[in-house]
Image: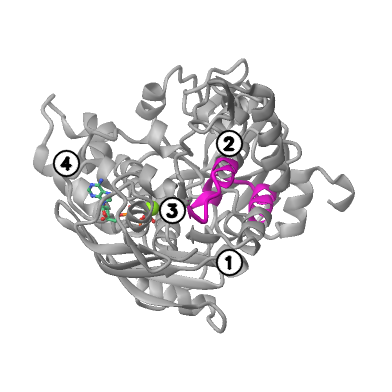
Amino acid sequence: MDLSADALVKRYPGVLALDGVSFAASGGEVHAVAGENGAGKSTLMKVLSGAVRPDAGTLAVDGRSVRFESPHAAHAVGVRMIHQELSLVPELSVAENVFLGAEPARRGVVDRARQHAAARAVLDRLGQARLDPAARVADLPLAARQMTEIAKAVAADARVLIMDEPTAILAQEETDALFRVIAQLRDEGVAVIYISHRLEEIFRIASRITVLRDGRVVESASLAGMSRTDVVKLMVGRELAAGYPRPAAAPGAEVLRLERVDSGPVRGASLALRRGEIVGLVGLVGAGRTELAQAIFGAAPLTGGRMFLDGAPFTPRTPREAIAAGVGLLPEDRKRQGLVLMGTIRENVSLPSLGAMAPRGVVDRARERAGVARWVEALAVRPPMLDRAAQQLSGGNQQKVVLARWMLRHSRVLLFDEPTRGIDVGAKAEIYALMRRLADDGAAILMISSDLPEALGMADRLVAMRDGRVVGELTRDEATQERVAALILGESAAA
Ligand SMILES: Nc1ncnc2c1ncn2[C@@H]1O[C@H](COP(=O)(O)OP(=O)(O)OP(=O)(O)O)[C@@H](O)[C@H]1O
Ligand SMILES: [Mg+2]
């Protein structure tokens, strides 16, 4: 089935999110959609899937004009979107979710056995033999939830499948599994539309690419014969100075020390951070990296061990206490823990700094605006409107707002949990440079990254975790992909 759009326009207050976008995806192809944060990718997908109504322009299925008044109308002709925030009912089982609204019934009663068997068949077809149809969705890891959502689309015989940054939540093995499923659906004639900021993925899975910039299509072409540099140039409109900033000259005094810390799944973790250095915390999903950062941030209690900040015992019982002591956290899940969605950009950025800006109890608003504006500009938050609600920003721009918060706060210790997830290539380079600048200004940075080349490129030192424990440390010179992999996977023979 082919899905096409002609001259779509979608206006939001102050932003032309789609400015005459034409697009076509055909059955049997994986069509990548790329572009900077805020370029209009998600908006285009929402229009294609009936979630957002365009101000102008038309849609057609197999050349016949259609109008999607709702996602339901799009489902009816086989167009489905797998959402960045998954839309399953957590209390129900996998099978119940797969057939929600389309339950196999006998005399008006849901036929549970048939539903289970049918879900099993769909999951098997997708190569998901280990996913149990009876499992409660709430108990499943994110990757399995995403597969459930895909199974739901497949069960409904989706002919166009739209995926908006599906691998942002996945580990490497899970990405491989997803790509096998995508390739299979493509071979069965499904049109897959695939948004990603990761160029390697685009080149691996897609045959065509459409690049958006500022709500317009700058190119729609076959990927054959295109290089990564070509794609980056199309996305950002210029060539990017490749690579990572130079490493720290010499780290300074110790700022933070952890001694045998236990917290949640974290067991006996010891490590130290010094001024001016970026320490990469690597490990598989589930190794305990996020939990360790949460413990340092006062968001999870210590059940054992001790922490010291500048040599003094450090016992934050809440994030508020940690922030007051100069510790900042960029959380992995920015929607849940990072942002006040109803708040404006200004409020979100200045929140933890207001105390410092109100020497006599009254916030100096001019100073606040100037401080916020400086970081909004440095990080290229788009649109750079300080009074826009965080909710109205694109995913990558929300991430930048949380980054700007800790930049403004002058934190001594910064915990960055997957700081570049969902960030476009151009902004990534800017964030790397800013992180290095923060370190040069004296901050100690702990950077959790599941992107191994990124961790190797950015960190002055790497600390590896496995099963809740710190299992090794490598200096920048010692760190190679192989040695890091050996540590995080636990293949001692290869170390
Ligand atoms: N509900 C909304 N209200 C107001 N503006 C919005 C809304 N949704 C999106 N926008 C704006 O429309 C533009 C396009 O946003 P969109 O989410 O489509 O970008 P994107 O390409 O998906 O970016 P990202 O890579 O960061 O996810 C942005 O400027 C964004 O701020
Ligand atoms: Mg988006």
Dot 2 or dot 1: first in sequence order is: 1
**Disc 3 packing (10 Å; few <14; some 14–19; many ≥20):** many
Q: Which residue is mark 2?
A: 145
Among the 4 quarters of the image, the one containing residue 201:
bottom right
**Residue 7 seen by the camera:** yes
Q: Nearer the viewer, residue 51 or 487?
A: 51
Q: Which residue is mark 1?
A: 28
Q: Which residue is mark 3?
A: 435
Residue 319 percent location from the top left of the image:
41, 24
> Residue 473, relative to residue 100: is it above or below?
below
Tell me, for residue 368, which label it has, or none: 4
Q: Do callouts 3 and 2 mark residues in contact (Cβ within 8 Å)?
A: no
Dot 3 or dot 2: first in sequence order is: 2
Tell me, for residue 154, which label it has, or none: none
Q: Is residue 152 magenta?
A: yes
| Distance (Cα) linking label 1 and label 3 | 42 Å
